[in-house]
Image: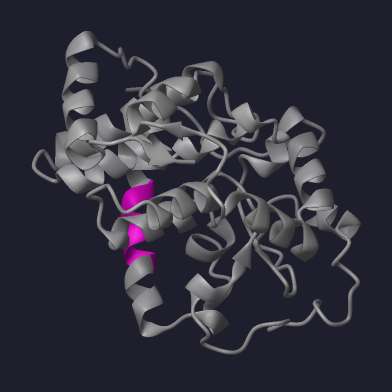
């Protein structure tokens, strides 16, 4: 484990900056609604969760300044971090393993800004806690008087689950888990996956005006999970062994014994 790594170090005029400039220019309310309509049908592919994980062997996250390894490796790193601390918490271990699998969107021809990156709420004012906030001035909604208010199209305490969030792997995997009934991962964990990239909320303290008492519990759960997700990137000496892969393949078969619609 390398404890000298500085995580989430976002620099100007870097590849990461260019990525977010593209994301912020494109991910408007109408764009998100279009993607939700497209992917809610889950008619793109049928495949197992295990196979979907293997597809991430070919994907390196361009939004993350901390990693340059295949996303599948990061998935195993996260799960292993959890297993070391919570050896009997199989549900959280499987969440660590699958939390990024929605990035298979890249196989459907989606641009990177529709796959990865910190997410944010659309349909209301953009808080300054969003990374590279200044690039949001290019977003079509930035100067829309109906959307550029604290509540926008929402109401106070409407619940995080009723907000529309910039589209990507989090929301997509949530749709897969919600709309397939042939798996055994409880709903509580779907929401951890759904909101784990919403950094302006869980780390930036934004969007509290929309939160319910249930969302307060969710916030603690997401922060608890994210300590394993984020800091697994310190494990630069991690080696993915056949024994580790076998352990998680058995876990995948337990929670996802059948193919899913994607």
- In the rendered image, residue 221 lying in the magenta stretch gets the answer yes
- Looking at the image, residue 132 sits to the left or right of residue 248; the answer is right
Measured along the vertical axis of the image, is residue 198 above or below residue 121?
above
Task: Work out which residue is located at the far left of the displayed protein and give it.
Answer: 88
Q: Is residue 107 above or below residue 246?
A: below
Along the viewing direction, whichever of 202 and 10 lies nearer the viewer: 202
Query: Looking at the image, can residue 38 be seen?
Result: yes
The image quadrant that residue 192 belongs to is bottom left
> Does residue 90 lie above or below 194 as drawn?
above
The residue at the point 22 percent across, 27 percent down is 248
**Residue nearer the viewer, 25 or 111:** 111
Which region of the structure is painted magenta?
Answer: 219-226
Q: Within the magenta stretch, is there residue 111?
A: no
Q: Position of residue 221 (x, y in %)?
A: 31, 61
Residue drawn at point x = 24 percent, y = 47 percent = 92
Q: Out of 234 and 194, give the one closest to the viewer.
A: 194
By what rule are the colours in the image chosen? one colour
**What is the x, y in percent for residue 84?**
16, 34
Q: Main secondary structure of the magenta part?
A: helix
């Amino acid at each position: 484990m390398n404890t000298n790594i500085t995580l989430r170090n976002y620099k100007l005029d870097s590849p990461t900056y260019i990525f977010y400039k593209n994301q912020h220019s494109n991910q408007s309310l109408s764009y998100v609604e279009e993607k939700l309509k497209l992917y809610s049908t889950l008619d793109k592919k049928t495949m197992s969760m295990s196979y979907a994980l293997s597809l991430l062997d070919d994907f390196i996250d361009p939004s993350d300044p901390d990693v340059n390894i295949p996303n599948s490796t990061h998935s195993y790193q996260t799960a292993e971090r959890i297993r070391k601390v919570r050896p009997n918490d199989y549900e959280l271990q499987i969440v660590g393993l699958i939390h990024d699998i929605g990035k298979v969107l890249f196989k459907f021809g989606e641009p990177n800004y529709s796959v990865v990156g910190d997410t944010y709420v659309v349909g209301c004012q953009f808080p300054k806690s969003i990374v590279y906030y200044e690039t949001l001035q290019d977003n079509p909604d930035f100067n829309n008087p109906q959307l550029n208010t604290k509540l926008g199209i929402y109401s106070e305490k409407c619940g995080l689950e009723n907000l529309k969030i910039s589209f990507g792997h989090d929301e997509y995997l949530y749709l897969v888990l919600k709309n397939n009934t042939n798996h055994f991962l409880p709903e509580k964990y779907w929401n951890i996956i759904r909101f784990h990239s919403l950094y302006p909320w869980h780390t930036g303290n934004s969007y509290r005006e929309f939160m319910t008492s249930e969302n307060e519990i969710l916030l603690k759960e997401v922060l608890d999970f994210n300590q394993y997700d984020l800091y697994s990137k310190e494990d630069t000496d991690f080696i993915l062994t056949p024994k580790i892969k076998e352990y998680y393949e058995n876990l995948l078969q337990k929670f996802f014994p059948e193919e899913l619609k994607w």
